Amino acid sequence: MKVLIIHAASAGEVIFSTPLIRAIKTHDARAGIYYVTTSSGTLPLEENALVSATYDVKQGVLKLYRELQGHSFDMVIDLDRNFLSYILTRLTQGRLLYGPKASWLTNFVRRKSAESTEQTHLVERYLRVLDSTEISQHQHPLDFTIPYKDEVPLSWLPEPYSKGYVVLCIQAQYATRRLPVKRMVELCDRINKPIIILGETHDQEDGNEIEKFFKRTDKTNQYEEGLQALNKKAEVYNGCGKFNFHQRASLIKQAQYVFTFDNDCIAIASAFEKYVFSIWGNTVLQSGRYPYQTGFTIFEKNNLACRPCSTKGYAHCPLKHFKCMNDIVFDFYLP
């Protein structure tokens, strides 16, 4: 059996689709899995032995068709249900199965209705694609293997991080999915442990600002005794832009805890069964992207009439108050 999966999604959402892949392979160990996704979506599949080949959707429909036409697919799974995937499914043959697709309007209606409390994880939504087949929908764990060359030994990290640390992932597709910098500083102070900040290159400036706030210098040495008396242990290393995707995953894998916004780090941390503190702003858990099969705590501001303001996000709060992030209370304890 040959199966084509079409999902031009983020790395995190591709990781959340791996139980679907494993369900197919469990049903038929000889099944060939071919995956069309984004360039970032191919990253978590690089070392996945269950996937026969990946294809970058940026190649365009015609080039993809040329690469795929040599295969005779028994099943085509369209998890995107958009114009591009529609064309691609029409150019390939095989039993066609559709994944979930909720529009912004659907989410808005749910938010205003009694269904707004319903939270179905993205993994479960993907597995429902198999409803009309004989393939079992057993909820397998997430599959994600880090290439050996990208494993980051703790001995490479400076003190005190080599003895244990907490990860704070500050990357976010949109600004309304992340805390303002001053609130990130507040969060780091509340964590009160050595912290490695992870993010993309464009997150470096914010990471530098947070790192600078907690940096020990000759001028601050005179206060060190007082800080110790107050049990102030927060130290920050800005790793934004310094590690590639798999290296960031390696650091997450070895962290004591992971704090993150609505981003790919949720799926990565879930794959390694790390305890996740997930912080939600304009987006909500009904998106299905919350931690999976691992312990987690959710921080969000409920009972806001304006939330969610979109399924994705904005560069700025449309109402300019940003209460969904500014009013979150950080109530937790790390042993």
Image (cartoon, rainbow, N blue to C red):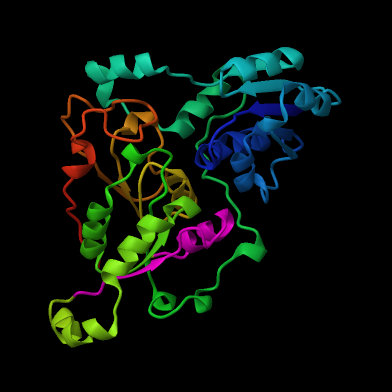
Q: Is residue 68 above or below residue 251?
A: above
Residue 241 as seen in the image, left or right of residue 318: right
Q: Position of residue 278 (x, y in %)?
A: 32, 47
Residue 158 picture location, percent across and down: 45, 78
Range covered by the magenta-colored residues: 232-255
In the image, residue 23 lies at what x, y percent?
Answer: 60, 35
Is 286 contained in the magenta span?
Answer: no
- Quadrant assignment, res 19: top right
Q: Is residue 32 left or right of residue 308?
A: right
Compared with 207, 226 (above or below) is: below
Task: Judge whether 146 appears above or below 137 on screen.
Answer: below
The C terminus lies in which quarter of the figure? bottom left
Residue 250 falls within the magenta-colored stretch: yes
Give left or right: position of 120 versus 82.
Answer: left
Of 272 and 324, which appears nearest the observer?
A: 324
Instruction: Report x, y in % for residue 76.
Output: 68, 21
The answer to whether any part of residue 27 appears in the image is: no
Residue nearest the observer in this picture, 75 or 329: 329
At 23% from the left edge and 17% from the top edge, which residue is drawn? 112
Q: How many marks?
A: 0
**Which residue is nearer to you in this view: 244 or 35?**
244
Whether residue 284 can be seen here: yes
Give the residue displayed 26% in from the left and 62% down from the top: 188
Residue drawn where x is 75% and y is 40% of the image = 52
Which of the image's four quarters has the N terminus? top right
Furthest toward the right, the residue is 70
